Image (spheres, rainbow, N blue to C red):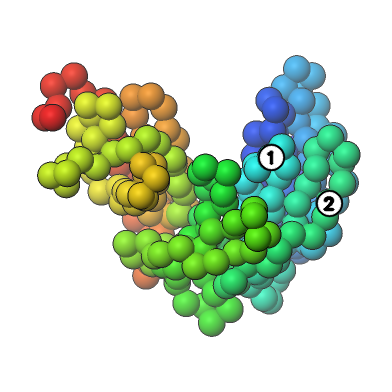
Amino acid sequence: LPSEVNHGTAINVSGRILLVGGRNSSNQKTNQVLELDPSTSQWTQKAPMPTPRYGMKLVSLQNKVWAIGGKDGATHLNKVEIYDPTADSWTTGPSLVTERYFGSAWVAHGKIYVGGGRSNSNSFLNSIEVYEPSSNQWMASGVLPENKFAAEVAVAGKLVDRKGRTKLAGANFEGSFQCLEESFGLSFFISGGFGASFFSSSMVFSSFGLGGGGLANSTHSIFRKSHNSPS
């Protein structure tokens, strides 16, 4: 990297990696935006984010990157700013209903969902809100099974059958993921927080993290595809 970064947030955009915000070597919040071109292994400085912050979430919607929530040092934010990689420019988006530091964010069916995180009262949150493009507003959209801070989310297909078993295309479930079943037939795996997760056609993985009470743990959970899972 061109400079030290901690608590930055990264996202893959058209095969390139954007690293946004975070704190520098002096532990000061930054609005730096760096782009990595894997073909050259070179980082390029891009237009800075308007609000220096860390602990926000990045998602991609309609070819633009949304920087959601975070913390500016003293205050947990409900701020949303939108980056256009083609124009290398930022615009202001609609503010969240609730400020969220290290919330979770995901995109499904053309909408952005944000859940959990920490509010200005330092409370761990379990609320979810959704961005509706038709109204350009955020609105309440249910709750997580428990309060979550710095949790990761993996989006998969429909995972819960009528008997309550959790499965994906004939898969068995191992571990303690939480699965949110939405009426439109998508599910979201929520890991403990401050962990890593990924989803493939055969497995979802999550490692360690913080739960709603802020206690660290060293657990991991794996959702594996199985050829003999019950129907």
- Ranked by sequence position, the earlier of labels 1 and 2 is 1
- Label 1 crowding class (10 Å Cα cut-off): few <14, some 14-19, many 20+? few
**As drawn, 140 above or below 37:** below
Residue at x 80% of width, y 38% of height: 85
The label shown at residue 45 is none
Mark whose residue sits in front, 1 or 2:
1
**As drawn, 223 above or below 4:** above
Q: In which quarter of the image is the N terminus?
A: top right
Asked whether, in this view, residue 108 is left or right of residue 184, the answer is right
Residue closest to the eye, 189 or 160: 160
**Please, what is the three-letter code of the amino acid marked with disc 2?**
Trp
- Tally of numbered tags: 2
**As drawn, 112 above or below 202:** below
- Label 2 crowding class (10 Å Cα cut-off): few <14, some 14-19, many 20+? some
In space, the residues marked 1 and 2 are separated at their CA atoms by 14 Å
**Please, what is the three-letter code of the amino acid marked with disc 1?**
Gln
Can see residue 182?
yes
Asked whether, in this view, residue 163 is left or right of residue 58, the answer is left
Residue at x 52% of width, y 48% of height: 106
Determine which residue is flagged by label 1.
62
Q: Quadrant of the C terminus?
A: top left
Helix, strand or loop at mark 1: loop
Residue at x 54% of width, y 82% of height: 121
Q: Position of residue 50 (x, y in %)?
A: 83, 59
The label shown at residue 90 is 2
**As drawn, 139 above or below 15:** below
Q: Where is residue 62 in the image (x, y as percent from the top left)?
A: 69, 40
Residue closest to the eye, 145 or 187: 187
Residue closest to the eye, 36 or 154: 154
Asked whether, in this view, residue 133 is left or right of residue 154, the answer is right
Helix, strand or loop at mark 2: strand
